[in-house]
Amino acid sequence: MKFPDISRWRGPGMPARNGRGVSGVNGWAAVSAVTVALVAVPATAEPLVLLALGDSLVAGFGLPPDDGFTAVLEDALQAEGYDVTVVNAGVSGDTTAGGVARLDWSLADDPDAVLVELGANDMLRGLDPEDARENLSAILARLQDEGIPTLLAGMRASPSWGPEYQTAFDTIFPDLAAEYGVPLYPFFLEGVAADPALNQPDGIHPNREGVDVIVANLLPYVIDLIDGQTSAGG
């Protein structure tokens, strides 16, 4: 808390050299009482910072800013009584490799916790699942080294890639969650994927109604992550 410079006060209750106003012991007593009162008021706690590291699903592609994932999640958390700022570190088109490349820049926000949502573009482009695994592992290892609580959001491969690719991709997320001991939200698009009513015309990106479903499903996991942080004194 930044205290005001009382040496510059010239209001009622301040001793005056010309004798006007409250003077002597009573005047200084008034100033002392104000100072004690200021000291007794606890500093306002800073909001927790939750960094959402992701792709277009986090960035809010095709949506007004207030309808994007991070804005809706922040509103939902505040409605539940949590003073949390959700930082939008989503980049449309980003792959897991892109997430690794900009991790240092993203962590400049000094987050208290991180939600990792990456992998959808690796899958859509048919990139090697082992590369995605290595990239996500590098991200989780860095966050672990930094001591930042992390929630991993999973993604699932389209059946069009075939069962071998699908198995190799889908196992990335539970495997890494177990390896690094982080909570896993199994599928970021749960209840939204392939539902025309909840997606934009491209059939890939959620509309506002779809974002509401994602946030409602994910919210208990985020609250658990935040509760763990606050109970640890973070």
Image: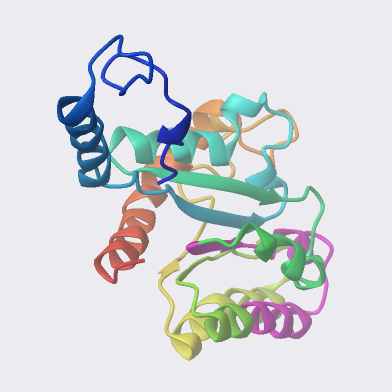
Q: Where is residue 179 in the image (x, y as percent from the top left)?
A: 49, 90
Residue interval drawn in magenta = 112-139
Q: Where is residue 205 in the image (x, y as percent from the top left)?
A: 67, 39
Q: Can residue 113 be found in the magenta stretch?
A: yes
- Compared to residue 169, the image places residue 19 above or below, namely above
Q: Position of residue 114 (x, y in %)?
A: 53, 63
Q: Can residue 181 be found in the magenta stretch?
A: no
Report the side of 63 relative to 122 (left or right).
left
- Quarter of the view holding residue 3: top left
- Compared to residue 179, the image places residue 97 above or below, namely above
**Which residue is most to the front?**
18
Given residues 206 and 114, the one toward you in this image is 114
- Quarter of the view holding residue 80: top left
Given residues 173 and 9, the one toward you in this image is 9
**Residue beneath the point at 30% across and 9% down:** 20
Total numbered labels: 0
Report the side of 75 relative to 134 (left or right).
left
